[in-house]
Image (tube, rainbow, N blue to C red):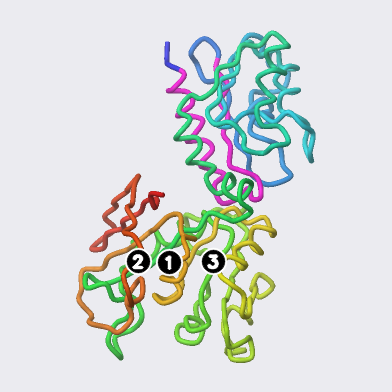
Amino acid sequence: MMSDEHFIQLAIAVAQKGVGLTSPNPPVGAVIVRDGEVISEGWHATAGGPHAEREAIKNAGKGVDLTGATIYVTLEPCSTRGRTGACTDAIIEGKFSRVVYGARDVNPAHAGAADEILKSAGIEVVSGVLEEECEFLIRGFSKRVESGLPWVIAKTAMSLDGRITRPEGEGQWLTGAEARAEAHQIRAEVDAIVVGGKTVRRDDPGLTVRGDAVREEKIQPWRVVLTQSGKKNLPVESKIFTDEYKERTLVYEDVSLEESLQKLGELGCNTVLLECGGVLMRQFMEQGLVDEVAVFFAPMLTGGGDFGFGVGAHLQKSLAVEKMEVKQLGDDVLFRGLLKR
Protein backbone atom coordinates (compact mmCIF):
# COMPACT_ATOMS: atom_id res chain seq x y z
CA MET A 1 0.00 0.00 0.00
CA MET A 2 1.22 3.49 -0.86
CA SER A 3 1.70 5.87 2.08
CA ASP A 4 -0.34 8.94 2.93
CA GLU A 5 2.74 11.03 2.06
CA HIS A 6 2.74 9.56 -1.46
CA PHE A 7 -0.85 10.56 -2.17
CA ILE A 8 -0.49 14.01 -0.63
CA GLN A 9 2.53 14.49 -2.89
CA LEU A 10 0.28 13.61 -5.83
CA ALA A 11 -2.27 16.14 -4.58
CA ILE A 12 0.45 18.81 -4.40
CA ALA A 13 1.35 18.11 -8.03
CA VAL A 14 -2.31 18.46 -9.00
CA ALA A 15 -2.62 21.72 -7.01
CA GLN A 16 0.28 23.21 -8.97
CA LYS A 17 -2.04 23.42 -11.98
CA GLY A 18 -3.94 26.18 -10.19
CA VAL A 19 -0.96 28.30 -9.10
CA GLY A 20 -1.45 31.86 -10.30
CA LEU A 21 -5.09 31.30 -11.26
CA THR A 22 -7.04 31.25 -8.00
CA SER A 23 -6.47 34.53 -6.14
CA PRO A 24 -7.77 35.66 -3.74
CA ASN A 25 -8.20 31.94 -2.99
CA PRO A 26 -5.31 29.51 -2.53
CA PRO A 27 -4.35 26.78 -5.01
CA VAL A 28 -5.54 23.39 -3.73
CA GLY A 29 -5.34 19.86 -5.06
CA ALA A 30 -7.29 16.71 -4.17
CA VAL A 31 -6.88 13.03 -5.00
CA ILE A 32 -9.45 10.26 -4.36
CA VAL A 33 -8.05 6.81 -3.59
CA ARG A 34 -9.63 3.41 -3.08
CA ASP A 35 -7.69 0.23 -2.31
CA GLY A 36 -4.41 2.02 -3.04
CA GLU A 37 -5.50 3.15 -6.52
CA VAL A 38 -6.14 6.74 -7.61
CA ILE A 39 -9.63 6.94 -9.07
CA SER A 40 -9.95 10.71 -9.48
CA GLU A 41 -8.27 14.06 -8.96
CA GLY A 42 -9.25 17.71 -8.99
CA TRP A 43 -7.90 21.16 -8.34
CA HIS A 44 -9.24 24.62 -7.65
CA ALA A 45 -8.99 26.35 -11.02
CA THR A 46 -10.43 29.82 -10.39
CA ALA A 47 -11.93 31.96 -7.64
CA GLY A 48 -15.67 31.37 -7.53
CA GLY A 49 -15.34 27.97 -9.16
CA PRO A 50 -15.63 24.56 -7.50
CA HIS A 51 -13.06 23.71 -4.86
CA ALA A 52 -10.61 20.88 -5.38
CA GLU A 53 -12.62 18.34 -3.37
CA ARG A 54 -15.79 18.94 -5.35
CA GLU A 55 -13.87 18.82 -8.62
CA ALA A 56 -12.33 15.48 -7.68
CA ILE A 57 -15.74 14.07 -6.74
CA LYS A 58 -17.23 15.27 -10.05
CA ASN A 59 -14.29 13.90 -12.03
CA ALA A 60 -14.80 10.46 -10.49
CA GLY A 61 -17.83 10.17 -12.78
CA LYS A 62 -21.55 10.44 -12.39
CA GLY A 63 -23.00 7.70 -10.23
CA VAL A 64 -19.64 6.31 -9.09
CA ASP A 65 -19.92 5.00 -5.54
CA LEU A 66 -17.25 6.62 -3.37
CA THR A 67 -18.32 4.91 -0.16
CA GLY A 68 -15.29 3.96 1.91
CA ALA A 69 -12.78 5.85 -0.27
CA THR A 70 -10.10 8.22 1.04
CA ILE A 71 -9.75 11.79 -0.19
CA TYR A 72 -6.33 13.44 0.05
CA VAL A 73 -6.30 17.26 0.05
CA THR A 74 -3.42 19.73 0.30
CA LEU A 75 -5.49 22.10 2.46
CA GLU A 76 -8.00 21.59 5.24
CA PRO A 77 -11.46 21.25 3.62
CA CYS A 78 -13.60 24.35 3.95
CA SER A 79 -16.56 24.11 6.29
CA THR A 80 -18.51 27.27 5.42
CA ARG A 81 -20.59 28.15 2.40
CA GLY A 82 -19.26 30.88 0.13
CA ARG A 83 -19.78 31.06 -3.61
CA THR A 84 -19.66 27.26 -3.52
CA GLY A 85 -20.94 24.81 -0.93
CA ALA A 86 -18.83 23.66 2.01
CA CYS A 87 -16.45 20.88 1.03
CA THR A 88 -17.07 19.09 4.34
CA ASP A 89 -20.71 18.67 3.19
CA ALA A 90 -19.60 17.16 -0.11
CA ILE A 91 -17.24 14.75 1.66
CA ILE A 92 -19.97 13.61 4.06
CA GLU A 93 -22.45 13.21 1.20
CA GLY A 94 -19.87 11.16 -0.71
CA LYS A 95 -19.63 8.71 2.23
CA PHE A 96 -15.86 8.83 2.38
CA SER A 97 -14.37 6.85 5.23
CA ARG A 98 -11.17 8.87 5.54
CA VAL A 99 -9.84 12.38 4.90
CA VAL A 100 -6.13 13.18 4.84
CA TYR A 101 -4.92 16.73 4.42
CA GLY A 102 -1.69 18.71 4.64
CA ALA A 103 -1.96 22.33 5.77
CA ARG A 104 -4.46 23.91 8.14
CA ASP A 105 -6.41 26.83 6.70
CA VAL A 106 -5.37 30.21 8.10
CA ASN A 107 -8.73 31.70 7.19
CA PRO A 108 -10.38 32.30 10.58
CA ALA A 109 -13.83 31.69 9.06
CA HIS A 110 -13.26 27.96 9.09
CA ALA A 111 -9.74 27.29 10.39
CA GLY A 112 -9.67 24.04 12.35
CA ALA A 113 -13.42 23.39 12.05
CA ALA A 114 -13.27 20.58 9.47
CA ASP A 115 -11.85 17.99 11.87
CA GLU A 116 -14.75 18.16 14.29
CA ILE A 117 -17.40 18.24 11.56
CA LEU A 118 -15.97 15.24 9.73
CA LYS A 119 -15.24 13.20 12.84
CA SER A 120 -18.79 13.81 14.07
CA ALA A 121 -19.95 12.21 10.82
CA GLY A 122 -17.86 9.11 11.52
CA ILE A 123 -15.05 9.97 9.12
CA GLU A 124 -11.42 9.40 10.10
CA VAL A 125 -9.31 12.56 9.76
CA VAL A 126 -5.53 12.72 9.46
CA SER A 127 -3.94 16.19 9.28
CA GLY A 128 -0.46 17.65 8.90
CA VAL A 129 0.81 15.21 6.26
CA LEU A 130 3.62 16.94 4.33
CA GLU A 131 2.42 20.06 6.09
CA GLU A 132 5.46 22.19 5.29
CA GLU A 133 5.24 21.41 1.56
CA CYS A 134 1.51 22.17 1.54
CA GLU A 135 2.04 25.44 3.41
CA PHE A 136 4.68 26.45 0.86
CA LEU A 137 2.11 25.97 -1.89
CA ILE A 138 -0.24 28.55 -0.32
CA ARG A 139 2.37 30.93 1.10
CA GLY A 140 0.94 33.94 -0.76
CA PHE A 141 -2.63 33.31 0.40
CA SER A 142 -1.53 32.72 3.98
CA LYS A 143 0.53 35.90 4.20
CA ARG A 144 -2.25 38.06 2.75
CA VAL A 145 -4.89 36.62 5.10
CA GLU A 146 -2.68 36.99 8.17
CA SER A 147 -1.05 40.37 7.45
CA GLY A 148 -3.02 42.07 4.68
CA LEU A 149 0.15 42.13 2.56
CA PRO A 150 0.84 39.89 -0.44
CA TRP A 151 3.84 37.59 -0.76
CA VAL A 152 6.62 39.51 -2.55
CA ILE A 153 9.09 37.93 -4.98
CA ALA A 154 12.05 40.06 -6.05
CA LYS A 155 13.15 39.02 -9.56
CA THR A 156 16.15 40.38 -11.37
CA ALA A 157 18.65 39.39 -14.05
CA MET A 158 22.24 40.46 -13.66
CA SER A 159 25.74 39.93 -14.95
CA LEU A 160 28.38 38.11 -12.94
CA ASP A 161 29.58 41.46 -11.63
CA GLY A 162 26.09 42.24 -10.30
CA ARG A 163 25.00 44.74 -12.97
CA ILE A 164 21.53 44.86 -14.55
CA THR A 165 22.40 46.95 -17.62
CA ARG A 166 24.71 46.46 -20.59
CA PRO A 167 26.96 49.02 -22.29
CA GLU A 168 25.33 51.52 -24.64
CA GLY A 169 24.28 50.00 -27.97
CA GLU A 170 24.33 46.35 -26.87
CA GLY A 171 20.59 45.98 -26.25
CA GLN A 172 18.70 45.42 -23.02
CA TRP A 173 18.76 41.63 -22.66
CA LEU A 174 21.28 40.03 -20.33
CA THR A 175 19.86 36.51 -20.40
CA GLY A 176 19.01 34.12 -23.21
CA ALA A 177 15.72 32.74 -24.50
CA GLU A 178 15.45 29.88 -21.98
CA ALA A 179 15.89 32.20 -19.01
CA ARG A 180 13.39 34.69 -20.40
CA ALA A 181 10.85 31.87 -20.87
CA GLU A 182 11.39 30.89 -17.22
CA ALA A 183 10.82 34.51 -16.21
CA HIS A 184 7.40 34.35 -17.88
CA GLN A 185 6.63 31.20 -15.92
CA ILE A 186 7.36 33.14 -12.74
CA ARG A 187 5.10 35.95 -13.96
CA ALA A 188 2.37 33.35 -14.47
CA GLU A 189 2.48 32.59 -10.73
CA VAL A 190 1.73 36.14 -9.61
CA ASP A 191 -1.18 38.59 -9.47
CA ALA A 192 0.75 41.85 -9.92
CA ILE A 193 4.09 43.05 -11.28
CA VAL A 194 5.68 46.14 -9.73
CA VAL A 195 8.14 48.50 -11.42
CA GLY A 196 9.32 52.05 -10.89
CA GLY A 197 8.78 55.00 -13.18
CA LYS A 198 12.41 54.86 -14.31
CA THR A 199 11.93 51.33 -15.68
CA VAL A 200 8.88 52.48 -17.68
CA ARG A 201 10.75 55.45 -19.12
CA ARG A 202 13.94 53.51 -19.90
CA ASP A 203 12.70 50.10 -21.08
CA ASP A 204 9.00 50.55 -22.05
CA PRO A 205 8.22 47.04 -20.72
CA GLY A 206 5.00 45.19 -21.56
CA LEU A 207 4.92 43.36 -18.21
CA THR A 208 2.58 40.70 -19.61
CA VAL A 209 2.67 36.92 -19.32
CA ARG A 210 3.61 35.37 -22.64
CA GLY A 211 4.80 32.04 -24.01
CA ASP A 212 3.43 28.68 -25.14
CA ALA A 213 3.61 27.20 -21.64
CA VAL A 214 1.34 29.85 -20.09
CA ARG A 215 -2.23 28.68 -19.58
CA GLU A 216 -5.03 30.46 -21.44
CA GLU A 217 -7.00 30.86 -18.20
CA LYS A 218 -4.35 33.14 -16.75
CA ILE A 219 -5.60 36.69 -16.21
CA GLN A 220 -2.84 39.16 -16.98
CA PRO A 221 -1.30 40.45 -13.73
CA TRP A 222 -1.88 43.99 -12.57
CA ARG A 223 0.96 46.19 -13.86
CA VAL A 224 1.85 48.56 -11.06
CA VAL A 225 4.06 51.63 -11.48
CA LEU A 226 5.40 53.33 -8.36
CA THR A 227 6.35 56.94 -8.99
CA GLN A 228 7.17 60.00 -6.92
CA SER A 229 7.17 62.40 -9.86
CA GLY A 230 3.60 61.56 -10.91
CA LYS A 231 1.90 59.95 -13.89
CA LYS A 232 2.40 63.14 -15.89
CA ASN A 233 6.09 62.26 -16.16
CA LEU A 234 5.44 58.78 -17.57
CA PRO A 235 5.35 58.42 -21.39
CA VAL A 236 1.70 58.25 -22.46
CA GLU A 237 2.68 56.07 -25.44
CA SER A 238 4.16 53.36 -23.20
CA LYS A 239 2.93 49.81 -23.83
CA ILE A 240 1.33 49.55 -20.40
CA PHE A 241 -0.92 52.55 -21.20
CA THR A 242 -1.80 51.66 -24.80
CA ASP A 243 -1.91 47.88 -25.29
CA GLU A 244 -4.94 45.59 -25.02
CA TYR A 245 -4.37 45.17 -21.27
CA LYS A 246 -4.17 48.88 -20.44
CA GLU A 247 -7.05 48.48 -17.97
CA ARG A 248 -4.72 46.23 -15.94
CA THR A 249 -2.27 49.11 -15.33
CA LEU A 250 -2.18 50.96 -12.00
CA VAL A 251 -0.07 53.99 -11.09
CA TYR A 252 0.58 54.67 -7.41
CA GLU A 253 1.89 58.18 -6.92
CA ASP A 254 3.93 59.13 -3.88
CA VAL A 255 2.76 56.32 -1.57
CA SER A 256 4.96 54.26 0.73
CA LEU A 257 6.08 50.83 -0.41
CA GLU A 258 4.09 49.12 2.32
CA GLU A 259 0.99 51.11 1.44
CA SER A 260 1.32 50.07 -2.21
CA LEU A 261 1.41 46.43 -1.12
CA GLN A 262 -1.58 46.96 1.16
CA LYS A 263 -3.54 48.32 -1.80
CA LEU A 264 -2.68 45.22 -3.81
CA GLY A 265 -3.67 43.00 -0.91
CA GLU A 266 -7.05 44.74 -0.84
CA LEU A 267 -7.42 43.92 -4.54
CA GLY A 268 -7.04 40.23 -3.63
CA CYS A 269 -3.46 39.84 -4.81
CA ASN A 270 -1.79 36.91 -3.06
CA THR A 271 1.60 37.20 -4.76
CA VAL A 272 3.45 40.20 -6.22
CA LEU A 273 6.55 40.24 -8.40
CA LEU A 274 9.12 43.04 -8.26
CA GLU A 275 10.78 43.72 -11.61
CA CYS A 276 12.03 47.16 -10.68
CA GLY A 277 15.49 48.68 -10.86
CA GLY A 278 18.15 48.25 -8.22
CA VAL A 279 17.39 51.36 -6.17
CA LEU A 280 13.71 50.54 -5.68
CA MET A 281 14.48 46.85 -5.20
CA ARG A 282 16.90 47.73 -2.42
CA GLN A 283 14.30 49.90 -0.71
CA PHE A 284 11.86 46.97 -0.62
CA MET A 285 14.66 44.84 0.85
CA GLU A 286 15.68 47.41 3.45
CA GLN A 287 12.08 47.73 4.65
CA GLY A 288 11.73 43.97 5.09
CA LEU A 289 9.02 43.66 2.45
CA VAL A 290 10.59 40.92 0.30
CA ASP A 291 9.82 37.26 0.98
CA GLU A 292 11.48 35.46 -1.91
CA VAL A 293 14.16 36.12 -4.51
CA ALA A 294 14.62 34.87 -8.07
CA VAL A 295 17.98 35.97 -9.47
CA PHE A 296 19.10 35.10 -13.00
CA PHE A 297 22.84 35.28 -13.61
CA ALA A 298 24.16 35.72 -17.14
CA PRO A 299 27.74 34.64 -18.02
CA MET A 300 29.06 38.10 -18.80
CA LEU A 301 30.72 41.10 -17.16
CA THR A 302 29.17 44.41 -18.15
CA GLY A 303 30.60 47.00 -15.75
CA GLY A 304 27.32 48.94 -15.98
CA GLY A 305 26.30 51.58 -13.48
CA ASP A 306 23.11 49.88 -12.27
CA PHE A 307 23.41 47.13 -9.68
CA GLY A 308 20.75 44.46 -9.14
CA PHE A 309 20.05 45.45 -5.55
CA GLY A 310 21.24 49.04 -5.62
CA VAL A 311 24.22 50.63 -3.91
CA GLY A 312 24.74 52.32 -0.57
CA ALA A 313 25.39 51.30 3.00
CA HIS A 314 25.20 47.68 4.07
CA LEU A 315 21.85 46.24 5.02
CA GLN A 316 21.31 46.23 8.76
CA LYS A 317 21.71 42.46 8.66
CA SER A 318 22.70 39.93 6.01
CA LEU A 319 19.72 38.05 4.63
CA ALA A 320 20.11 34.30 4.31
CA VAL A 321 18.21 32.42 1.61
CA GLU A 322 16.68 29.00 2.29
CA LYS A 323 14.81 26.38 0.26
CA MET A 324 17.21 27.28 -2.52
CA GLU A 325 16.52 26.06 -6.05
CA VAL A 326 19.26 26.30 -8.66
CA LYS A 327 18.32 25.80 -12.31
CA GLN A 328 20.51 25.83 -15.41
CA LEU A 329 18.75 27.61 -18.30
CA GLY A 330 20.93 27.49 -21.38
CA ASP A 331 24.03 29.52 -20.50
CA ASP A 332 22.24 31.25 -17.62
CA VAL A 333 21.58 30.13 -14.03
CA LEU A 334 18.56 30.87 -11.85
CA PHE A 335 18.92 31.03 -8.07
CA ARG A 336 15.53 31.04 -6.35
CA GLY A 337 14.72 30.79 -2.66
CA LEU A 338 12.98 32.25 0.38
CA LEU A 339 14.47 34.93 2.59
CA LYS A 340 15.03 33.47 6.05
CA ARG A 341 13.44 35.58 8.77
Mark 3 to mark 2 CA distance (whole Å): 24 Å
Q: Is 20 contained in the magenta span?
A: yes
Q: Residues within 10 Å of mark 1 (few under 14, many from 20)?
A: some
Q: Which residue is mark 1?
A: 286
At mark 2, the secondary structure is loop
Residue 303 appears at what percent x and percent y?
22, 82
Q: Eyeballing the image, is 221 above or below 43?
A: below
Q: Residues within 10 Å of mark 2 (few under 14, many from 20)?
A: few
Q: Amino acid at mark 3?
A: Ile
Residue nearest the observer in this picture, 237 or 272:
272
Give the quarter of the figure containing the N terminus. top left
Mark 1 to mark 3 CA distance (whole Å): 19 Å
Q: Is 29 contained in the magenta span?
A: yes
213 left or right, relative to 60: left
Residue 201 appears at what percent x and percent y?
50, 87
Q: Are marks 3 and 2 in contact (CB under 8 Å)?
A: no
Q: Which residue is mark 3?
A: 193
Identify the magenta region.
4-33
Q: Residues within 10 Å of mark 3 (few under 14, many from 20)?
A: many
Q: Are marks 2 and 1 in contact (CB under 8 Å)?
A: yes
Q: Picture quarter containing residue 160?
A: bottom left
Q: Which residue is mark 2?
A: 315
197 left or right, relative to 93: left
**Sequence-first disc among 1 and 3:** 3
